[in-house]
Image (cartoon, helix red, strand yellow):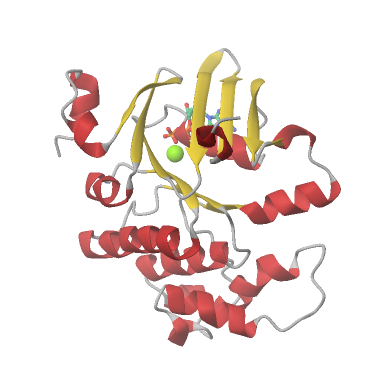
């Protein structure tokens, strides 16, 4: 195992997924390194969300392996499975807060739901994570009282409650105005710097990609067809690749 391999926190190998006769993922390979942010670009409907859903087990791949910290996620049981649930945080496209719960309850929920939860008071943790997203004063609000950008930030704070090593973001800035998008992008960078998290971020928001990406990969016809830094790919000789960068 060389140094490069040791720093791999997530490894996707030979991932295939079809729905009926429609091939969506056709040999997807990706290694995510510790403290790295990888941005995934691709046209709508190309399978970007399917990749994240395969990682968290919401969709079963037809073939291929997904290893987290060296362990195949397919065969996880018991403690390994609960560790996995803590290790990987998923920020859904919608933010997906529970509307009937206050902000505080939304943040407590992932902790209380854990098998090894022992009834301890998690208020200080809730406050810490709300401070991370600059929303400590919203602790007793209901989701319906929050703007779209605030809901996204609360969703991120909730994801952070379990101290994940890896965060998967599905279009974190979609539907937000430029200013709020920039705030979310800044938070993604902050989470990496403060907690050393590794992230995969699906986005169409190129200013966001420019701010956060250590590496960008492009999904086309079920495969990653290009990878590089923002500057490298924006100067690609390939028209398709370059098209993402003319915005
Ligand atoms: N659970 C599912 N059942 C059937 N088809 C699905 C399912 N999830 C996604 N698809 C199809 O897979 C394709 C890729 O979807 P998705 O990953 O959501 O695209 P995107 O790249 O926009 O995130 C789409 O054609 C979608 O309709
Ligand atoms: Mg999607």
Asked if residue 3 lies left or right of residue 83, the reply is left
Q: Tell me which residue sits at (51%, 74%) in the image.
A: 129
Ligand 2 location (quadrant): top left
Count how many numbered circles sit on residues in the image.
0
Asked if residue 38 lies left or right of residue 245, the reply is right
> Picture coordinates of residue 172 (x, y %)?
39, 53
The answer to whether residue 244 is visible is no
Q: Tell me which residue sits at (75%, 65%) in the image.
A: 113
Asked if residue 119 lies left or right of residue 227, the reply is right
Residue 187 against residue 22 in the figure, above or below: below
Q: Tell me which residue sits at (64%, 40%) in the image.
A: 68
Tell me the quadrant of the picture where the C terminus can be found: top left
Point out the residue furthest to the right here: 78
Q: Tell me which residue sits at (20%, 36%) in the image.
A: 231
Tell me the quadrant of the picture where the N terminus can be found: top right
Residue 242 against residue 158 in the figure, above or below: above
Between 56 and 99, the one nearer to me in the picture: 56
> Picture coordinates of residue 160 (x, y %)?
55, 64
Residue 168 against residue 2 in the figure, above or below: below
Where on the picture, by quarter, is residue 187? Answer: bottom left
Point out the residue furthest to the front here: 2
């Amino acid at each position: 195992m060389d140094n490069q391999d040791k720093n791999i926190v997530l490894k996707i190998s030979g991932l295939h997924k079809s729905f009926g006769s429609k091939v969506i993922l056709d040999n997807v390979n990706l290694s995510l390194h510790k403290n790295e942010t990888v941005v995934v670009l691709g046209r709508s409907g190309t399978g970007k969300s399917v990749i994240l859903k395969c990682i968290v087990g919401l969709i079963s791949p037809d073939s291929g392996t997904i290893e987290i910290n060296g362990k195949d996620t397919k065969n996880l049981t018991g403690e390994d499975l609960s560790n996995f649930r803590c290790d990987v945080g998923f920020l859904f496209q919608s933010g997906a807060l529970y509307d009937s719960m206050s902000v505080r309850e939304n943040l407590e929920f992932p902790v209380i739901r854990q098998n090894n939860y022992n009834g301890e008071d998690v208020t200080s943790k809730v406050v810490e994570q709300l401070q991370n997203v600059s929303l400590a004063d919203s602790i007793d609000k209901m989701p319906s009282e929050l703007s779209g950008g605030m809901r996204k930030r609360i969703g991120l704070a909730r994801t952070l409650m379990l101290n994940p090593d890896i965060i998967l973001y599905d279009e974190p800035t979609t539907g937000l105005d430029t200013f709020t998008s920039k705030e979310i992008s800044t938070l993604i960078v902050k989470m990496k710097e403060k907690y050393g998290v590794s992230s995969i971020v699906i986005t169409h928001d190129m200013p966001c990609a420019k701010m956060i990406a250590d590496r960008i990969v492009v999904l086309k016809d079920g495969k990653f067809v290009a990878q590089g830094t923002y500057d490298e790919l924006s100067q690609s000789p390939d028209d398709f690749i370059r098209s993402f960068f003319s915005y």
